[in-house]
Image (cartoon, coloured by chain):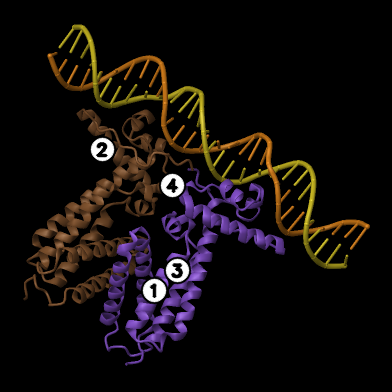
Chain colours: A brown, B purple, C yellow, D orange
Amino acid sequence: MRVPSYTSAQPKVPQQKRGERRVTELLEAAETVIAHIGYEAATMSAIAERAGAAIGSLYQFFPNKACITQALRTEYAKQFDHMYAKLAEEARTLDREALVSRLIDLTVRFVDTHPALPALLDAPQSTRAPIAIRKVLRERFTALLLAHSPRISKSKALRLGTVTLHLIKTLNQLYVELPPQERRKIVQEFKMILLSYFNARIKPGPSGGVRK
Amino acid sequence: MRVPSYTSAQPKVPQQKRGERRVTELLEAAETVIAHIGYEAATMSAIAERAGAAIGSLYQFFPNKACITQALRTEYAKQFDHMYAKLAEEARTLDREALVSRLIDLTVRFVDTHPALPALLDAPQSTRAPIAIRKVLRERFTALLLAHSPRISKSKALRLGTVTLHLIKTLNQLYVELPPQERRKIVQEFKMILLSYFNARIKPGPSGGVRK
DNA sequence: GAGGAATGTGAGGATTCCCTCGTGTATCAT
DNA sequence: ATGATACACGAGGGAATCCTCACATTCCTC
């Protein structure tokens, strides 16, 4: 495949309401097309057609395939982050076990409501969201842990957050490729992993969190 | 990209010594090319050229790009499995903590000695090793756990093995994308994850394994 | 309502890549 | 040696994609 030489071209940002509509239409089209036939097989013209737009209109806003995929990933990441932002609010009132449980359950729900996720996880690195976005996510998780266990250091929280994020990513990967009847068990398994990891790593018991 | 309609064509197996040499040359070439420029950018002609072979010779043995990548993955998987086969022998003599430590250390060494691994992990699903190979790996890990803790049930060992395998895969992904100075810490972190997971999941303490 | 900017359009150029195929050479069995 | 089979070669067909570009249309501003 011809790989564009520029690493990551910026999408042109729309200036009119009409343009914004187009962009969301195009992103939705990209989502369904990619979800349906995968990243590799998804072509720019298929995306344009699905959006009811001309190929030229697509290129107006997204100079290449990696770019629109990246935009879609960014959108997903933002929604992911937003979801956990809500959880952060209640983090300090939660039992550690409940926190872990909520964390995992939210993830699973996210997978279930974002049809293109499997295909996006399968897409090449060149389509990943920009570093800034990923940093936001890491910090969200860091903040979440700090809210729940205020006594750990910032750097430790960062490390825990990074690892937690990747564990959740792993769960996603596993979850989407598993037959439905095995999913429940894996979810349980990951709750156990996270919980025992936290218990081992945040020694003095749930310093935050309400005992019942 | 044009995606071949056939799901997964078989490579033609060489019949002469000359052919076997060619195949290993081609696989080595594929390894270095893919490691160097990534799966997407790697073209069949680049691989052939690197191997000092004509494009026709390449297609003699590997009918398409997914196929040769799959073959490379299969080779990697076999080496991976072989590595853990050795560990299985000493598994019952090892402390649980030592077992986990060896498990992780081996993984890291594997990453360091297999340059194409990052690119392969980034390659699309269509290039994954056949199910049979993956099954072998799962069973290797299952056997490993059973050797170490004979008292757990087969099905439980299977679940633990599957999860362990995926945790190790996660470590790989994280490891390759991290700057070297952060790698040590992540390695430590994953040892802790695995160990605390085992301790939580295999309750009665190290049933196998020698106490010191 | 005039002018400029943003957006829409789609045929087609330019590339690139995958893969075939006809032909030539090595290898091996008998 | 001789036939048969495996392997080597590489120019080029075929196919598909990416992306441009010149021109239409809509929108907004003053």
Residue at 52% across, 70% down: B78
Is A7 on the left or on the right of D3, as rendered?
A: left
Q: Which residue is mark 4?
A: A40
Sequence order check, earlier mark of 2 and 4: 2
Q: Is residue A7 above or below residue B122?
A: above
Residue B132 on image: x %, y %: 51, 69
Task: Please tell me which residue lies in front, A103 or B198.
Answer: B198
Chain identifier of the residue bearing label 1 in the image: B
Q: Secondary structure at mark 2?
A: helix
Residue at 20% across, 72% down: A198
Is B209 on the left or on the right of A187, as rendered?
A: right
Q: Which mark is residue B105?
A: 1
Q: Secondary structure at mark 4?
A: helix
User: For the residues tagged 3 and 1, is the chain the same?
Assistant: yes
Q: Which residue is mark 3?
A: B110
Q: What amino acid does circle 2 point to? A: Thr
Q: What residue occupies the far front of the structure in this picture?
A: B181
Q: Which residue is mark 2?
A: A24
Q: CA distance from mark 4 to mark 1?
A: 35 Å
Chain identifier of the residue bearing label 3 in the image: B
Q: CA distance from mark 1 to mark 2?
A: 46 Å
Question: Label 1: few (<14), some or many (≥20) within 10 Å?
Answer: some
Q: CA distance from mark 4 to mark 3?
A: 29 Å
Residue A5 on image: x %, y %: 42, 39
